Image: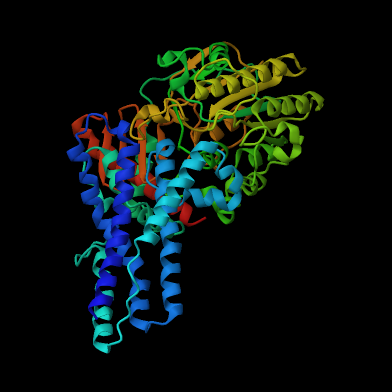
Amino acid sequence: MMKSLKSFLLTLLLWTLTGTVGHVLFLLLYSGLMAGTAWSERLLAVVYGLKLDVAVGAYLTVIPALLLMIGAGHRWMKVLWSAYFALFGAVYALATVANLGLYGPWGFPLDYTPVLYLKTSPAEAFASASFWQISAAAATMFLLAWGVWRLRPRYESSPEWGGRLVLLLLTGALVLPMRGGLSTGTNHTGTVYFSENIRLNHAAVNPVFSFIESATHQEDLSSQYRFMSDDEAELLVDNLNHETDTVAQELRNILFTAKPERIVLVILESFSTQLMEEAGLVKGAMPRLEQLAAEGVSFTRFYSNTMRTDRALVSVLSGIPAFPTYSLMDQPRKTATLPSLASALKQAGYSTRYYYGGDTNFSNMRSYLVAAGFQDIVSEKDFPAAQRTGKWGVADGPVFDRAADDLEKMPLGRPLLAVVQTSSSHEPFDVPNHKALAHPALNAFHYADSCLGHFVDRLRRQPGWERTLVVAVADHQGCYPEVMDNYTLEHYQVPLVMTGGLVRAPRRIDTLGSQTDMVATLLSIVGVSYEAFPWSKDLLNDGVAHYAVFAVPDAVGMVRDGGALIWDNTSSRVMLSTWPEGRQEQALQTLKAYYQKLYKTADRL
């Protein structure tokens, strides 16, 4: 009996220590992000993280415990024992390595997002990683998995019924560490949060636990972001939307005509206002976009709704804010019911086209675009194999050229919406034959920017330029600066520029807005109703309340003229606030009400 009991306890200890190794590797790899924090405080992440490590260890000990109770020394039981540790050692190692690799660019612990991408396009899911990064990850994963298998306890089955009864009782007792004790509250990711430094909290999170928690909440929308009664939330959101700006602006007359014949919407991968010279961080990264902003209409207080492209596309094209725990695009059943810019303009007589150099199956993009009303979708399969030079498919240059060629051939007289989505300014920044800047990321942005400029130059020379409106907007803040905090406003500020032959004169507009406002603004320019888009505001209408919202996994933010606020739902903490102390609580309640109503809306789709 004692031998089987020892095997049981060593199994629980091994799985717990596997989680601890992950915390230590995280602290070492991201030591630079925690500069100024003493190692004594950093190591507290290991201590606090033990609660979830033991919880995961308890779950992973159940099957070995059953094998110890059932077996009687048969050879096949020993084979099952070894196979179990090999399999789940590999799974644990995969989660640990994925968390280590993704935290840098994403800034939050491992969740279900990578699976959403793997399901639709495995090749593009790995497109951001270089050969050396993949090699290092594979080596680390192998060493972790091998270590678990090599250190597995001996299989020692108890032949006595008394010993089996003790094992049964101990297995039942594993429920306590699984749920986190005897209190009414159960374990969740925020259980291990202990510090004012959010990165230390993330270091304490067990990636296996956070992944499972995220995966099991994908469809459970009705219970998420519930802070108050629905009536109270509705009232707060109504009050938010009925406020008006204190400073009236003459915004409407920015174009020569109220109805553009051609609307060309360019969605720029990872472009950020931080890359523009005005921010003072870099010079010469995006000279053409800056030129277009100076010549056209530039929105200076514009925010992305999210940090991933799949969420951003739904915000830009359907006017739906991004969810902090959920990707709407991954649910074709729901996206099929969404209104969209393309479908609204198609009903107004516009034809619709979409250009993207990558795989449109990635994250169910094609399903969404078809449902959104795009009649012609050009993707990497529509380009010669020789042009598929990057990990994300076709570089921006050929994509813009294809769009310009098609527009040149199309006869004037029928209104058109053409959307061009770029990808070259995404990791791993493998742009073709472009060496303008030494820094790989900045060089990739410079390449994408030059392609945009060349594209606009070609449109300028085409007939119909005087009836064309070109809109350039980023999907989200990207990979430069390399270290970016999810809890800063700068992380979400992105450019929105309107140019074209229809623009009357250069103009800077300081109205607050975010990507959800694109639909209402463009439809109002055309003269089409946007009543079907209740989350979208017309940026050119000074008679309505303007604000910006944004979300990253389990954290949300809102910027209004009175102040800004970011709320981390996992730790139930205000991470940033510029509101006067007396108004912060009301602003927080409004932010919570906004997302409570959003989740309720999505649950009903």
With respect to residue 320, does 464 lie above or below?
A: above
Residue 38 position within the rendered picture, expressed as x and y whole percent measured from the top left:
19, 34
Residue 228 showing in the rendered view: no
- In the picture, the quarter occupied by the N terminus is bottom left
Residue 98 position within the rendered picture, expressed as x and y whole percent measured from the top left:
44, 47
With respect to residue 258, does 570 lie above or below?
A: below
Q: Residue at x 19, y 65 (%)?
A: 183
Residue 446 position within the rendered picture, expressed as x and y whole percent measured from the top left:
56, 19
Which residue is at the front of the view, 332 or 206? 206
State left or right for residue 119 relative to residue 42: right
Which residue is at the front of the view, 318 or 219? 219
With respect to residue 182, does 361 lie above or below?
A: above
Where residue 555 sits, quadrant-wise, is top left
Residue 64 showing in the rendered view: yes
Residue closest to the far bottom: 161
State left or right for residue 543 relative to residue 461: left
State left or right for residue 456 relative to residue 117: right
State left or right for residue 198 relative to residue 526: left
